[in-house]
């Protein structure tokens, strides 16, 4: 039986624990969610939009307590946790206001006369497998468009985010989402395949590692069910010869340290042309060395503890492996002594291809800085990755920006900015960073039945 628990990353102490569901308890849960779908899909779109509006309002009202629970569960600095709640409110308001138009019927003019249109109908119950790094935001990206569309959901959250999972479920119910339309389930990985195979599950969405994505994608494919997979990233940060160094170096620090470096879209590989390398590195190392680091309850803190002892060990293993292959540590590089799972902002240079850190995602505040001869070499190195999620390009030339954006093998390109999130902007990647898109208009299309209604003679 799976066990869901909260261990405070700041102290390493167990806060609370919950027992997972048994095999016998999963069957009635699936039935509940399917029954909830049959009712929820028949509600008026305007009613569903009103519920989303109320969810947004409750996120504003409860932001402080929700943020405190997130900080206690996974160590997110409190100011960032509050920002996550604000982002969630914005996502639900966006789909409440813009969503009805997105799913309105689409008229088609048939070449042979008559009438035709496309309906965007719900498909059923979705299994949501969510990660710990953004315990509310990741849910909002899926729940907002799909609740509006008429789908219902079963949430399988990360084992260390049980309290946040319960908070989301309660908030949704308080806003008017029927109890059977969004169901939290404390189920383990061993139950996921069984649930995906069940005929009452229509689709699955996962945000997590590419390893988990391969497993879930295979299970969904075997059952011929739609899967959206938002996976890892080792995002390049390309510094062109004409970049504004002051802005670039400052943003580079922010991009690497957001959410204590535990973000799939955070900048991880800093690829700098030769003529700017030394100047950039000096400013970047100075910035990384001075990042406010420590207690996540301190409003000034930017980098708090990592989410778990295992997370810290994984990060340090990658750093040690890089050093063993000849890389140099310019700042950081050692776990902090004392209680909690702290790892300081770290900069690695001269990382060779033989080191794991050259291609693997480092899920912590560790930056890898590369020197390249020119912009063509920068693009080649940026694309030399199994991942293709987001990226940043720093240049003062619109022509250079457009050229690099066109050549990068990624799902998102940010010009003179680190990767951010906004409800109207589609989110997703290519290669081992996953399949499908969330947010924006594309996000509401993924689990919709695009149903053609055709009358050749017209009605």
Image: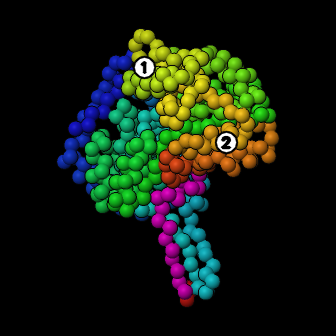
Question: Considering only vertical position in the picture, is 352 above or below 330?
Answer: below
| Disc 1 target residue | 341
The numbered dot on residue 379 is 2
The one of 325 and 199 positioned closer to us in this rendering = 325
Q: Position of residue 415 (x, y in %)?
A: 71, 40
Q: Is residue 77 visible?
A: no
Left or right side of 78 for 255: right
Image quarter where the N terminus lies is: top left
Q: Is residue 295 magenta?
A: no
The one of 379 and 435 positioned closer to us in this rendering = 379
Q: Is residue 444 visible?
A: yes
Q: Residue at x 35, y 24 (%)?
A: 7
Residue bounds of the magenta highlight: 439-456
Q: State the SS at label 2.
A: helix
Q: Is residue 442 magenta?
A: yes
Question: Considering only vertical position in the picture, is 44 above or below 181?
Answer: below
Q: State the SS at label 1.
A: loop
Q: Position of residue 253 (x, y in %)?
A: 63, 25
Which tag, 1 or 2, sits closer to the chain's start? 1
Which of the colour schemes (rainbow, by chain, secondary structure, one colour) is used?
Answer: rainbow
């Amino acid at each position: 039986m799976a066990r869901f628990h909260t261990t405070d990353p700041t102290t390493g102490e167990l806060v609370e624990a919950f027992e997972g569901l048994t095999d016998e308890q999963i069957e009635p849960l699936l039935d509940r969610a399917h029954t909830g779908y049959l009712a929820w899909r028949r509600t008026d779109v305007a009613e569903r939009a009103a519920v989303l509006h109320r969810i947004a309002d409750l996120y504003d009202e409860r932001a402080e307590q929700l943020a405190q629970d997130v900080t206690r569960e996974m160590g997110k600095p409190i100011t960032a946790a509050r920002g996550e709640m604000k982002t969630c409110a914005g996502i639900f308001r966006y789909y409440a206001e813009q969503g009805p138009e997105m799913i309105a019927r689409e008229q088609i003019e048939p070449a042979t006369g008559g009438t035709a249109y496309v309906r965007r109908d719900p498909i059923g119950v979705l299994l949501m497998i969510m990660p710990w790094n953004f315990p509310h935001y990741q849910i909002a990206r899926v729940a907002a468009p799909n609740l509006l569309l008429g789908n219902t959901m079963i949430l399988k959250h990360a084992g260390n985010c049980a309290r946040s999972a319960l908070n989301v479920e309660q908030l949704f119910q308080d806003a008017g989402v029927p109890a059977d339309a969004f169901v939290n389930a404390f189920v383990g990985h061993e139950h996921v395949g069984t649930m995906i195979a069940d005929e009452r599950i229509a689709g699955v969405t996962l945000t997590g590692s590419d390893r988990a994505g391969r497993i879930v994608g295979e299970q969904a494919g075997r059952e011929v069910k739609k899967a959206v997979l938002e996976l890892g990233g080792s995002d390049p940060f390309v510094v062109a010869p004409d970049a504004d160094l002051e802005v670039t170096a400052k943003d580079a620090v922010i991009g690497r340290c957001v959410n204590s470096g535990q973000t799939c879209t955070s900048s991880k590989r800093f690829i700098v042309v030769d003529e700017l390398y030394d100047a950039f590195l000096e400013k970047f190392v100075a910035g990384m060395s001075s990042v406010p680091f420590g207690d996540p309850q301190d409003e000034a803190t930017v980098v708090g503890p990592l989410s778990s002892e295992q997370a810290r060990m994984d990060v340090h293993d990658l750093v040690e492996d890089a050093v063993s292959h000849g890389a140099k540590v310019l700042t950081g590089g050692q776990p902090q002594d004392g209680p909690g799972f702290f790892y300081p902002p770290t900069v690695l240079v001269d990382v060779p291809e033989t080191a794991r850190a050259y291609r693997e995602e480092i899920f912590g505040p560790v930056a890898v800085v590369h020197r390249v001869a020119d912009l063509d070499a920068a693009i080649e190195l940026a694309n030399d990755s199994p991942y293709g999620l987001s990226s940043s390009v720093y240049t003062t030339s619109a022509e250079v920006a457009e050229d690099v954006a066109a050549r990068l093998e990624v799902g998102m390109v940010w010009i003179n900015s680190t990767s951010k999130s906004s409800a109207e902007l589609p989110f997703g990647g290519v290669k081992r960073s996953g399949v499908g898109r969330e947010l924006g208009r594309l996000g509401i299309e993924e689990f919709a039945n695009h149903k053609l209604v055709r009358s050749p003679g017209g009605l």
